[in-house]
Image: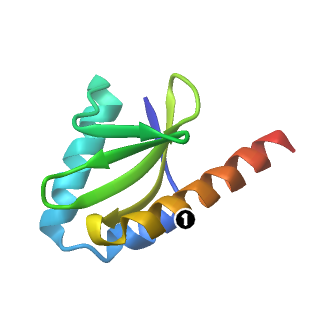
């Protein structure tokens, strides 16, 4: 699978400690190379990657080979992050329809 990271995700990721970056990259690598998603929730067109530490990453599968990494966050800001991820996805989908 091809992973595309939004600027919103990259900005959030760059603010994370190196240990957190490492576990995120390991998970994204498993998704792209093996198709193994791990612990997820699917809802409203989003796929939420979850960690027991509270980390959340919101993604969307556009077709069978492309995954868009929309936004990162944590359990405490989950509702706000979900709303923001939905808006980012709508913007991306709108730009592909034009």
Query: Position of 50 compared to 47: left or right?
Result: left
Residue 77 point in image, percent of width and height: 36, 71
Q: Residue furthest bottom?
A: 15
Per the image, the residue denoted by label 1 is 84
Binning the other alpha carbons within 10 Å of mark 1 as few (below 14), some (14 to 19) or many (20 upward) gives some
Left or right: residue 18 versus residue 11 is left
Compared with 26, 36 (above or below) is above
Q: Is residue 2 above or below residue 17?
A: above
Dividing the image into 4 quarters, which one contains the C terminus? Answer: top right
Q: Give residue 95's position: percent from left, percent from top.
A: 78, 49
Q: Which quadrant of the rendered structure holds the N terminus? A: top left
**Of all residues shown, which one is farthest toward the right?**
98
Horizontal side of residue 8 vs 23, given as left or right: right
The residue drawn where x is 32% and y is 25% is 35
Counting every numbered tag in the picture gives 1
**Residue 16 appears in which quarter of the rendering?**
bottom left
Could you say where residue 86 lies in the image, as x and y percent from the top left? Answer: 58, 55
Q: Nearer the viewer, residue 22 or 37?
A: 37
For the point 31% across and 33% down, the residue is 31
Name the residue: 23% across, 43% down: 27
Q: Residue at x 37, y 46 (%)?
A: 48
């Amino acid at each position: 699978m091809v992973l595309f990271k939004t600027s919103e995700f990259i900005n959030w990721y760059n603010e994370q400690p190196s240990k957190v970056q490492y576990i995120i990259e390991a998970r994204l690598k498993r998704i792209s190379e093996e198709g193994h998603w791990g612990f997820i929730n699917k809802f409203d067109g989003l796929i939420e990657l979850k960690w027991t530490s509270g980390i959340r990453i919101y993604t969307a599968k556009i077709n069978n080979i492309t995954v868009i990494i929309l936004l990162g966050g944590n359990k405490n800001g989950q509702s706000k992050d979900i709303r923001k991820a939905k808006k980012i996805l709508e913007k991306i989908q709108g730009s592909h329809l034009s």
